[in-house]
Image (tube, rainbow, N blue to C red):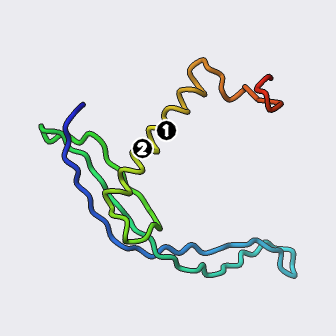
């Protein structure tokens, strides 16, 4: 296993996304209506893993609404484990296992 240093930083951000809706006006022309979105608070977390030769091994930039009681390092660790799981499922679905096409039709596992 490769030894790495973990560098983590975070900042609180406000995210707002406006909604748009296309409607036809009285003349039959398309008109866009904008509605201001509600602002939400989130944490922008940046985590970088650096090896002994100062090479960047991995880097994550995450948005999270997890409370401040959970450290940014913990959030990065969760993401690391989640990415491992996602990579494993990608392997199962795309490397000859055909997991995506297998569908269970009853409770005893037969297809």
Q: How many marks?
A: 2
Q: Are marks 1 and 2 in contact (CB under 8 Å)?
A: yes
The quadrant in which residue 62 appears is: bottom left
For numbered disc 1, what is the local secondary structure? helix
Q: Residues within 10 Å of mark 1 (few under 14, many from 20)?
A: few
**Residue at 19% in and 37% down:** 3
List the single residue furthest toward the top: 96
The span from disc 1 to disc 2 (Cα, nearest Å) is 6 Å
**Nearest to the observer: residue 107 or residue 41:** 107
On the image, the x and y values in percent for residue 25 come to 83, 79
Q: Look at the picture and state if 7 lies above or below 98.
A: below
Residue at 39% from the left image edge and 45% from the top image edge:
80
Q: Residue at x 27, y 62 (%)?
A: 9
Q: Which residue is mark 2?
A: 81
Residue underneath mark 1: 85
Residue 16 x %, y %:
53, 75
Viewer-proximal residue, 76 or 45?
Answer: 76
């Amino acid at each position: 296993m490769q030894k790495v240093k973990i560098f983590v930083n975070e900042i609180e951000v406000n995210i707002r996304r406006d909604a748009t809706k296309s409607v036809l006006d009285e003349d039959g022309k398309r008109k866009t209506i904008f509605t201001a979105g509600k602002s939400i608070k989130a944490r922008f977390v940046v985590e970088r893993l650096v090896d002994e030769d100062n090479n960047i091994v991995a880097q994550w930039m995450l948005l999270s609404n997890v409370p401040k009681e959970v450290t940014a390092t913990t959030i990065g660790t969760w993401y690391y484990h989640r990415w491992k799981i996602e990579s494993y499922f990608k392997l199962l679905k795309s490397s000859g296992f055909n997991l995506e096409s297998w569908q269970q039709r009853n409770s005893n596992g037969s297809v």
